[in-house]
Amino acid sequence: MSTTTTDAPGQGTAGGTSFAQATRLVAEREIKSFVRLKGFWIGLGVVIVGLFAMSVLPSVLGGQPSVAVVGAAEVRPVLEQLDVEIVEAQDVAAAKELVRSEEVDAAVVPDAKGESATGVRVVALSDPPAEIVAGLGVVPPVDLLETSEVSSGEQSIVVLVLAVLFVMFGMGGVAIAQSTVTEKQTRIVEILVATVPVRALLAGKIVGHTLLTLAQVVVVALAAPLALRAGGHGELLTVVLPALGWFVPFMILGFLLLAAMWAVAGSLVSRQEDLGATMGLAMMLVMGPYFAVLFFSDNTAVMTVLSFVPFSAAVAMPVRMFTGDAQVWEALASLGLLAVTASLVVMLGARLYSGALLQTRGKVAWSKAWARGD
């Protein structure tokens, strides 16, 4: 089938519709078709429930606390009654190292300063261990090895939440690929491109799904404070809210970056069964940042690099802003780099998309799609 369309923005299509109007119509069609699906609402519900679960369950299902002990024979019976795991340490330095490496939750060491009525001091990383301190009866002095607005455990929760959200919304782009394949498989695409430009069809899909993602991110941002309060992490709000504020624009630009790739992946095949063969690159660029941030969240040098790599910046930079390792100018520079990269990828993806969309017989090679694109 041979179809002639006009792609230039602002020019009319066969039906007298401008590029902008055609894009809006396609975006509306995509939004309406997906909000009518039960799976869309079930998925959003799972995200919200998961957010509350990650906030609440660690405190509900927390394991047995562990305490490093140096001497302090007089408090050992008390610690045993508290049902804590006692780890023997050779000296105070060894006990502090166990706390720093997070092998134990706290340490009970002799009070060399003579300030404690019990003769011991409690050493913790960034938060006083309330259960242990209270169980010792007379509250002993507590030494914190690191001063931080939030504990390492709470930081881990937030890092995990941001990384998981990035994967969930990034993988949401699969819907773009699936709808593109469905339109090719049913030959509806031939009718669509007779009415709207191919590039307007791509733009509409990207705009529609980006708006859906933005709406979901906003819902999550509104639910996050409630989840934190429910999990007893209310003090995190003052630190988390600025991080969520950065996460929204980074997530949207990151989704734009991936959306074009998902659309191209769908345009290169003509059957749903073949879609897996073209989605590998997009899936790698979604899952890669997730695992990189989880594995290297404590490595300042690696996180700095990841926060300026466009495909990982969407999750790495908000995490660095949360932990206080990045300045505002770094976030703005990373955001600008991500915006430029997203624009380039969308333009390149548009050529591949336009060259492969009407090829409805089997898989289309990248080189062939590029040659046929305009």
Image (cartoon, rainbow, N blue to C red):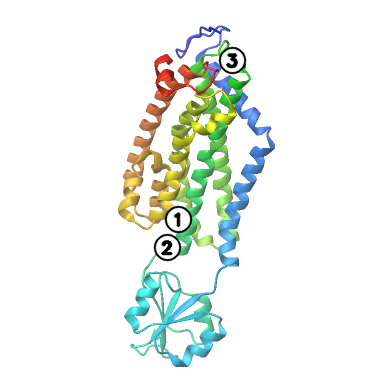
Q: Residue furthest front?
A: 362
* Kind of element beneath mark 2: loop
State which tag comes first along the sequence, 3 or 2. 2
Query: What's the residue type where badge 1 is placed?
Result: Val
Please identify the quadrant where the C terminus is shown.
top left
Q: Nearer the viewer, mark 1 or mark 3?
A: 3
Circle 3 Cα neighbour tier, 10 Å, few/some/many (<14 / 14–19 / ≥20): some
Q: Are marks 2 and 1 in contact (CB under 8 Å)?
A: yes
Circle 1 Cα neighbour tier, 10 Å, few/some/many (<14 / 14–19 / ≥20): some
Residue 231 visible in image = no
Q: Tag on residue 195?
A: none
Query: What's the residue type where badge 2 is placed?
Result: Glu
Q: Image point 45% across, 47% down: which residue?
A: 290
Q: Residue 138 in the image: state x and y as whole percent.
A: 49, 87
The residue pinned by badge 1 equals 239
Q: Nearer the viewer, mark 3 or mark 2?
A: 3
Q: Image point 48% across, 61% down: which residue?
A: 154
The residue pinned by badge 3 equals 192
Q: Residue 352 in the image: state x and y as whole percent.
A: 44, 21
Side of 114 where 204 appears, left or right: right
